[in-house]
Amino acid sequence: MFNNLVKDNYKVSFFEKSNCYTFEIPNFFSEEQYDILYKNLPNIERGEAANHNLEFYDKSKQNQLKDFISEVNGDRYNKTVGKSLILNEFVQQIKDPKFINILMKTFYFKILKSRVYDPKNFLKLLIRKNRGVKQKSSLLIDKFLYNDIITTVEFAYMYNGAQSYPHTDGMKKIMSLLLYFPDENMSDETSQNLGTTFYTSNEFNLQKKTSKNNINTYEESENFKRRNNKSMTLPFKKKNLYGFIKSHKSWHSVEPFDIHPDFVRKNININMLLI
């Protein structure tokens, strides 16, 4: 069903307005692939999400009104994604080292340029051979010769009224890939603000735990937005694969949305990590 997702020549279009390398791969899915993936997404009611997220109703927290299913969830991931033949097949294609290697080849010089202010990882990416793997090698010699790069897949649900504060992502992340699942018959006008929003900002943040520029509260988020301007919001469209390369100024967010009380914003986050 998803074998053709891994191919050597993706048609990549870059958005010029964003503060980092932001791009679109149109028609990543066929109509049939998208429809079957959409129909097999886990159905998570608001109450179930609140049971799994202790910050669900805390308006001061980044994770307010959100739920995620990822590999770190263990049993929950295995009971949902792991038991679905469709979802499991899709995830295995995305975690295929060949897919990772193609992405690294396609975006390598832009990834390198985006890490110029991160000397440690810049030198790693420049000197060692970068290779896609399913899990990190434990061999000592491999640690000197290779950068092991993996993908992780996360099913992300944001309930009506949610938002994500501006951030630049963790140090291990190289690239984020985003698949959006708008409701059937959702108009462009309704969905136009649901994609990931990017900011024109010169605020430097490599997302170290002690960074003074980390944004952790609603007040800090609002202050950042007052200081900086939005540059663009990705289209919240089906079938396309969107993405951006992490840098010291790849500030992005999901802006607050109010569609209707039962609305759930659904997307799949694919994280490419240098481990």
Image (spheres, rainbow, N blue to C red):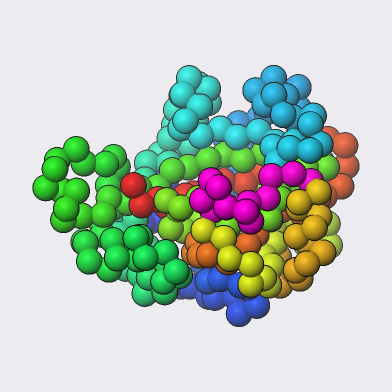
Magenta region, main secondary structure: loop
Taking the spot 66% from the left edge, 30% from the top edge, the residue there is 43
Residue 232's x, y, as percent?
70, 70
Determine the image quadrant of residue 88. top left
From the viewer's perspective, is residue 13 above or below residue 148? Answer: below
Taking the spot 53% from the left edge, 46% from the top edge, the residue there is 209
Residue 200 visible in the current orientation? yes
Residue 188 visible in the current orientation? no
Taking the image as shown, residue 22 lies to the left or right of residue 72, namely right
Taking the image as shown, residue 81 lies to the left or right of residue 200, namely left
From the viewer's perspective, is residue 106 above or below residue 151? Answer: below
Residue 157's x, y, as percent?
67, 38
Examine the structure image and report whether residue 184 is included in the region drawn in magenta.
Answer: no
> Which residue is more in the foreground, 203 or 199?
203
> Which residue is more in the foreground, 254 or 217?
217
Residue positioned most to the bottom: 16
From the viewer's perspective, is residue 210 above or below residue 52? Answer: below
Taking the image as shown, residue 259 lies to the left or right of residue 228, namely right
> Which residue is more in the foreground, 151 or 259?
151
First to last magenta residue range: 207-218
Taking the image as shown, residue 126 lies to the left or right of residue 41, namely left
From the viewer's perspective, is residue 260 above or below residue 170? Answer: above
Residue positioned most to the left: 141
Taking the spot 88% from the left edge, 37% from the top edge, the residue there is 261
> Which residue is more in the foreground, 62 or 17?
62
Residue 251's x, y, as percent?
63, 62
Tally the numbered discs.
Answer: 0
Examine the structure image and report whether residue 211 is included in the region drawn in magenta.
Answer: yes
Residue 211's x, y, as percent?
57, 52
